[in-house]
Image (cartoon, rainbow, N blue to C red):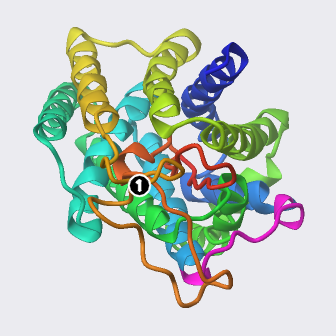
Amino acid sequence: MRPVHSALAVLVAAVWGLNFVVIEVGLDHFPPLLFSALRFLVAAVPAVFLVRRPGVALRWIVLVGLLLGVAKFGLVFTGMHLGMPAGLTSLVLQVQAVFTALLAVVFLRERLGPWRYAGMAVALGGIGVAAYDQGASGPMTAFLMVVGAAAFWGLANVVTRRAAPPDALSWMVWVSLVPPLPLFALSLLVEGPEAGLAALRGLDPAGVGTIVFVAWIATVFGFGAWGFLLGRYDASAVAPFSLLVPVFGMASSALLLGEEFTPLSWAAAALLVGGVALTSLTVRAPRSAPASACACGPERGPRPDPDEATGSRPVVPSASSACSPTGHPSGAQGRVRGTQAGTDAR
């Protein structure tokens, strides 16, 4: 990669890592479900009027919007609200790579080699260490919510790969249109109208700033830049930068929030990051794959969707290598320009 593009990849990872700290601050101003709803509303409007609809069937947009926006982020925001630390959240969410790979075996019939199974075992060992450490110092319910969020993220990654949207930015913007109404409804039912009205009446510059950051900086800029990189380089060149997200997340939470990490936390971090690296970075396309496209599964790409207006779909790489970090999953491509797909990680 060109140095300027490597710097851009590091910047995106830093933004996505810092985003966990911003969410922590935002939760002091908003109830979690309301905060998540506002995040997606601001990310979608007015951006939806500035980008074209991605060339995929509407059902894929709705499904990923529900899996990613409502289930994944609803659980993440609620888990952090209940006491899951920002830095630990940025780390534990990376187990989505394991869920993505396992779900790709079930739904996409991908084959996993011994190194990837070894990576999953190492990553799950890191989750076990993190769970033990969190159980001794914080609420286990919050921890389990974040693990559940990672599972929904993995499922959203697999569905995104099946949909194969051609552009990461327009895909993320249109997906962001789905969560606001369900999340607003859940907020009214779970958090109550009084809590939401109190938060909106007490809106201050800090609260507005958190919404702007998570919506426009982390989502629109982050996924736009990530899609730009995936459009110019192999996924194998871009994906390693995603491992910097928990590094920036843990460092920024320690510096800005005073979050402390125990020796067990660092052990969990080493196991998780190492396991995710093995799971995500050892994927090779079959030798028979065309030079202009990445492999989709062991022998064939996704079947054309009858609902597609275009009647065809680009081939995308392995689901486990197509995940953006943070919070943010994304599909990826080879060097074929314009074949970009992504879903928001944070």
Q: Is residue 142 visible?
A: no
Q: Give the magenta part as a residue range.
A: 47-59
Above or below, 198 relative to 116? below
- The verdict on residue 52 being magenta is yes
Q: Where residue 12 sits: x, y (%)? A: 64, 29
Q: Where residue 149 sits: x, y (%)? A: 38, 53
- Of residues 94 and 80, the one nearer the viewer is 94
- The verdict on residue 83 being magenta is no
Q: Main secondary structure of the magenta part?
A: loop
Q: Amino acid at mark 1?
A: Trp
Q: Quadrant of residue 59?
A: bottom right
130 horizontally vs 259: left or right: left
Residue at which label 1 appears: 153
Q: Where residue 190 sits: x, y (%)? A: 49, 68
Q: Residue at x 27, y 11 (%)?
A: 262
Bin the neighbour count of mark 1 within 10 Å (Cα to Cα): few under 14, some 14-19, many 20 and up: many
Q: Quadrant of residue 187?
A: bottom right
Q: Quadrant of residue 129?
A: top left
